[in-house]
Amino acid sequence: EVLLVESGGGLVPPGRSLRLSCAASGFTFDDYAMHWVRQPPGKALEWVSGISWNSGTIAYADSVRGRFTISRDNAKTSLFLHVNSLRAEDTALYYCAKDMTRGSLGYYFDYWGQGTLVTVSS
Amino acid sequence: QSALTQPASVSGSPGQSITISCTGTSSDVGIYNLVSWYQQHPGKAPKLMIYEVTKRPSGVSDRFSGSKSGNTASLTISGLQAEDEADYYCCSYVGSDTLLFGGGTKLTVL
């Protein structure tokens, strides 16, 4: 069974940083690209970032480029998102999602975690 | 980049069919057949319902179908059931390894 478990969220003041983690199991982690998708409370989904199986291809949404950094540790089957210079508009539930296609960055998410909540407020 | 445009809400009675549209531009939906649709029930993670415009993942009911014409993709749900009541999001590849979601549509089954 594929399992994605996010952690690392919390309440932080504007300008601070956090590291979000996603522990993956139930599939061959280093075969697949992975993504972060966020959802502000009561609002729509927003794709944030994706990373290919070997970290060779990384992409970011314009809204987070330069402030967020995605990474992965295939040996530990874990995905990370370093979120810096946090703003109120970054407040959201952050989901870890598995890419449906093996290898490079794909376009579809076939498994999702339950999310970790990041609240940016003073 | 602005979100893909979806109607805020649609509704239908049990047994009826409904269609949710997802409008992009000639730079995203119009040129890439890489549109997907996700269903999200309240408090739950999204679920992939359609990928590559028309394909259904294993386990998804054939009451769900996808299509595309020009810059607009569509999700059709036939034989509406109470459990179809949820939020639906489209998502498209928009180039440079990036993806864009729609604003979401709330489906109400009357």
Image (spheres, grey):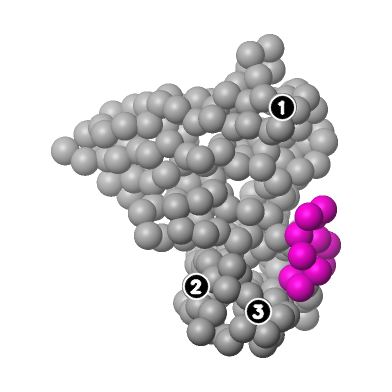
Q: Which residue is mark 1?
A: A26
Q: Secondary structure at mark 2?
A: strand
Task: Specify the amino acid type for callout 1.
Answer: Gly
Mark 3 lies on a secondary structure that is loop
Residue type for callout 2: Lys
Kind of residue indicated by mark 3: Leu
Q: Main secondary structure of the magenta part?
A: loop
**Real-space Cα separation, disc 3 to disc 2, in angstroms:** 14 Å
The CA span between labels 2 and 1 is: 32 Å
Residues under numbered marks 3 and 2 in contact, where contact means CB atoms less than 8 Å apart: no
* Residue identified by numbered label 2: B106
Q: Is B32 or B82 nearer to us in this picture?
A: B82
Return the residue at label 3.
B80
Residue B62, given in percent of the width and then of the height, sits at 81, 69
Residue B67 quadrant:
bottom right
**Marker count (numbered):** 3
Q: Which residue is found at the position 83% from the left and 62% from the top?
A: B55
Label 3 – label 1 distance at C-alpha: 33 Å
- Residue at horizontal 28 percent and vertical 29 percent from the top: A16
Q: What segment is highlighted magenta in the picture?
A: B52-64
Q: Which-is-in-front pick, marks 3 and 2?
A: 3
Q: Quadrant of residue A75?
A: top right
